[in-house]
Amino acid sequence: MSELIIGGRKFASRLFVGTGKFQSNEVMARAIEASATEMVTLAMKRIDMNDPADDMLAHVRRPGIQLLPNTSGVRDAAEAVLAAQLAREAFGTNFIKLEIHPDPKYLLPDPVETLKATEELARMGFVVLPYIQADPVLCKRLEEAGAATVMPLAAPIGTNKGLVTRELLEIIIEQSRVPVVVDAGLGAPSHAAEAMELGADAVLVNTAIAVAGDPVRMAAAFARAVEAGREAYEAGLGAQSRCAEASSPLTSFLD
Amino acid sequence: MFSEELLKYDWDETTARIAAKTGADVERALGKRRRDIDDFMALVSPAAAPYLERMAAMSRALTQKRFGKVISMYIPMYITNSCTNSCVYCGFNRHNKFPRVVLTPAQIEAECRAIRRLAPFENLLLVTGENPRAAGTDYLEQALRVCRPYFNNLTMEVMPLPAEDYERLTHSGLNGVVCFQETYHRERYKVYHPAGMKSNFEWRVNGFDRMGRAGVHKIGMGVLIGLEDWRTDVTMMALHLQYLRKHYWRTRYSVNFPRMRPSETGYQPNVVMTDRELAQLTFAFRIFDEDVDISVSTRERPEFRNNIATLGATSMSAGSKTEPGGYETYPQALEQFAVSDERTPAEVAEALRKAGCEVVWKDWDKVFD
């Protein structure tokens, strides 16, 4: 498989995972291991900065794993910038997953505040991975603003609905000059494989692993699906037969 | 800049890859939802020749889906044949001895009036040779200002300019820029363009980046068919288009496949492309890029134009004169190349309507510039 590079760092796995909703930190740690992921996102708001032995953090920090603190909980660009600065200090990384969702019900990202915050954070030297709507124009604007990736949603977060935004994701992938990470809404390994077959550079999965009957086995299943999907994309998918045969010749004028 | 991107593609290797395409590759390309450059290579390869009818049907369906049954009309206005280049195939080659003309503002205005009497054209293509001293950016700016009141959409086909000049001209009403790379074969390019500004391959090929950066609304591309292996050249152009779309995504794009016509130089094309191959290329481009404007000029014969208008083309010229002042001032001056379609705009429009197309003269308004 070809290499994925984000913020100057190489990633062998194209599966990124989240750390919310697990029944215990132990299960989470084993799921992370089974997923073979090299990028793990965690919410700033969950970490107890004053406790150096914070249990969750201890279960996530592993050699080879890039921590991706996220700004979940913030409601506008100013709060996001503050959260990013705190995260940089706390985790010693300039990677930041920008999540600004002022709407507490569907947790849909605010495009205006996200663009503003991306501009500012990129200027400040952060590697910004913004979570956003599957909006192709917004993706180009974020790219211009200095985003390291774009992370369009497949479906509203936590819904497990799969590639609801497929048509738009296809356009985003076609146009993007930065890696496209499909984030949110992937409920099954087949959804992840489908995203990878479309040409997504990576996917981020949390709920589908965390709330599975056996999160550890589900994490391994996602890992294989992501790999298979990427492999299929690079190998070149076969044709779907779907062609119109003309009844009257259109090209007889060339005879 | 695209010149760096182009280094990733070896000419001979690309030619070999196209030649190795099989019927199965063509089938796969036709069956996909979105096509990549490998699919494009299959569609322009010799292996696709037996699939021409299927490609025509698909190209027509895609064109109608995106553009409707519409042909947008434009007309070129040559304002100077003065040129410091010595392109071996071109009638304007500086070594050719014939009177050189640089139209004055008053003459340009007379040409505008003559064109408006000819047909209700709103899309004007201003064309020059390359002579920065006799017809530089100041001159172009003046020409645009003169034409502005007569037409809603001004495009120019002139020498590549610095980005700041493109930007300046957009403030004088410039909407689109057409520039033909002629060939993407770096080494052979120098043989065809031995002297003058045009001999600089990088300056020309990176001109498109400069247009994009300057925010030109529409960029027209083309390779001159008849120089190098056309299949390889159009593949490089398809790569270039893909690159430009990713970088300058606010811009619209058009392509053109001019086949070399006899000119004063008597230069003979190295490769001859048949009508059948030109049709294949047109279909291939449409299937590869559903959104690109495909323009067919009066270089092509009436029958070909009438048919291709319903199968993939989206814009056409008519009544074209390829000499400066040809509409009014100097109807006898030397032309750049001989046209094949000498019908009047009204005759072209009538034939297009009969073929089932709506003929559109105005599809832009200058208030948007």
Image (cartoon, rainbow, N blue to C red):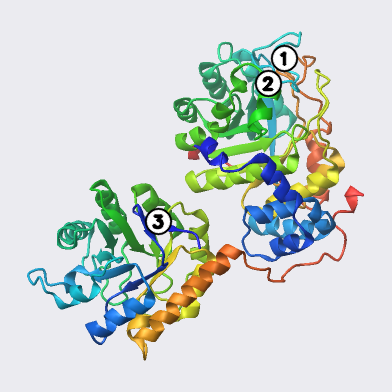
- Marks 1,3: beta carbons within 8 A: no
Q: Amino acid at mark 3?
A: Ile
Q: Is residue A102 above or below residue B263?
A: below
Quadrant of the rendered image containing residue A117: bottom left
- On the image, numbered disc 1 is attached to which residue? B329
Label 3 element class: strand
Q: Is residue A82 above or below residue B170?
A: below
Say whether residue B296 is visible: yes
The circle on residue B111 is 2
- On the image, numbered disc 3 is attached to which residue? A5
Q: Is B329 situated left or right of A26 in this image? A: right
- Marks 1,2: beta carbons within 8 A: yes
Task: Please tell me how crowded label 1 is: few (under 14), some (14-19), or many (20+) other residues with Cα within 10 Å.
Answer: some
| Cα gap from disc 2 to disc 3, whole angstroms | 56 Å
- The subunit letter for the residue under badge 1 reads B
| Cα gap from disc 1 to disc 3, whole angstroms | 61 Å
Label 1 element class: loop
Which residue sits at x=83%, y=34%? Answer: B341
Q: Nearer the viewer, residue A141 or A14?
A: A14
| Cα gap from disc 1 to disc 2, whole angstroms | 7 Å
Q: Is B19 situated left or right of B276 in this image? A: left
Q: Amino acid at mark 2?
A: Glu
